[in-house]
Image (cartoon, coloured by chain):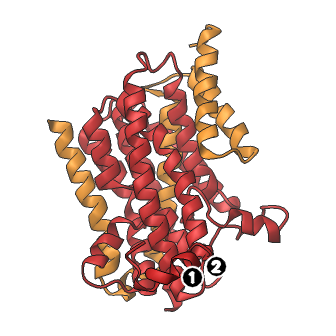
Amino acid sequence: MNLWMWLILSCLLAYAWKLLGYLVPASLLRNPRMSRIAGTMTIGLLASLTVVNAVASGQSLALDARLGALAAAAVALWFRAPFLVVVIAGAAAAAGLRLLGWD
Amino acid sequence: MGLDPDAAGPAAVKILQSPAVRIGLSISIATGLYGVSFGALSVTSGLDFWQTMALSLLLFSGGSQFAFIGVVAGGGSGVAAMSAATLLGMRNGIYGMQINALLQPRGWRRFAAAQLTIDESTATSTGQTDPAEQKRGFWTAGIGVFVLWNLFTALGALAGGALGDPKQWGLDGAAVAAFLGLLWPRLKGREPVAIAVVCALATVLAVPFVPPGVPILVAAVVAAGIGWFSHGRSDEGLEPDVDPYAEHHTHHHSGHSGEHSGGRPEDRPGENA
């Protein structure tokens, strides 16, 4: 139930951001600094989420099959594979490395 | 589409010849399809089917949805998951401002447009120059992505629930790949790469010292600081996950290097409207 509460709150806040753009005077959000922070934060958060999912295991760092997934995804992206192919490459690399005994 | 009065009746055939509608439809299919990976990862992260569907129907912003389940999967708290998802949703406010300036939706349409304001619909719309096309592009991509994204989320959630041990299928690796896939299109030029590296390092350094989920917020603070104190492109990082105009652009420049290879026109409508 607790997770539901945070989830619904996330949905409300997400909609609040979207609606804000339509309701506030454009001059307020046209401030290039706001737009820039929205952009740098998007990059920073996605980079952070990538490494957390690749190497964090609770509060410790672990080098395991997920690193293989990271490498496989990077290779797929380098060759401009579509998103779904990138995700499948990541899954296949992690699953494959585990089959080979590297956890 | 029924939402655009110009598009009704005898113009129905003409509408399929509209470049914005065609691009909107193809971006809908490309983006909608990867809803399957969100659905599968969400249920293996510990959310149930309806929680997964609530995220796709109500939150409806791919990056934020992946952020929410990514924090939960890593053992983070609900409040950390909410914070990461919310901070990542800030850019939708900027998009809303741009779309509001272009389309000026009134009444209930404004509230519908807000929910459909995401990377893909904004990019499809702002990539057009004719106001009618901008409108068609926004609604086609917005509604198209919404319908397909939710359909494929449901499929993925049902499939993911039947998989058993997610690690055996490498689904934790799929999550890593998904985040890199979301980040990749935003890394055009040296500056965004530098921001990404600094934030990744800050995250790794924070992991041993703070509860799960919090390192992501540390990185958000670092990124906001960079944005506040440095001067650079004001649209850095505001690129869609799937660029609707990628093909169009590869026609014009054979490479994809350079500062401006995204699907955005040089004169950003929000800034000179």
Q: Nearer the viewer, residue A73 or B163?
A: B163
Q: Are marks 1 and 2 on the same chain?
A: yes
Q: Where, by quadrant of the figure, is residue B178 drawn? A: top right
Specify the label residue B265 is tagged with.
2
B5 versus B46 height, above or below: below
Task: Note the chain letter of the orange one.
Answer: A
Q: Answer yes or no: do the residues labelled 1 and 2 have beta carbons within 8 Å?
A: yes
Q: Mark 2 — on which chain does it sit?
A: B
- State the count of labels: 2
Q: Quadrant of the N terminus of chain B?
A: bottom left
Give coordinates of residue B87: x percent, y percent.
37, 57
Give coordinates of residue B247: x percent, y percent.
73, 63
Q: Residue furthest bottom?
A: B273
Relative horizontal placement of residue B242, taking residue B273 as reference (left or right)? right
Q: Which residue is mark 1?
A: B268
Mark 1 crowd level (few <14, some 14–19, many ≥20, 10 Å Cα): few
Q: Mark 1 — on which chain does it sit?
A: B
Give coordinates of residue B131: x percent, y percent.
52, 88
Q: Residue at x 55, y 69 (%)?
A: B123
B151 versus B9 height, above or below: above
* Label 2 secondary element: loop
Going by the numbered disc 2, the residue's amino acid type is: Pro
What color is chain B drawn in?
red
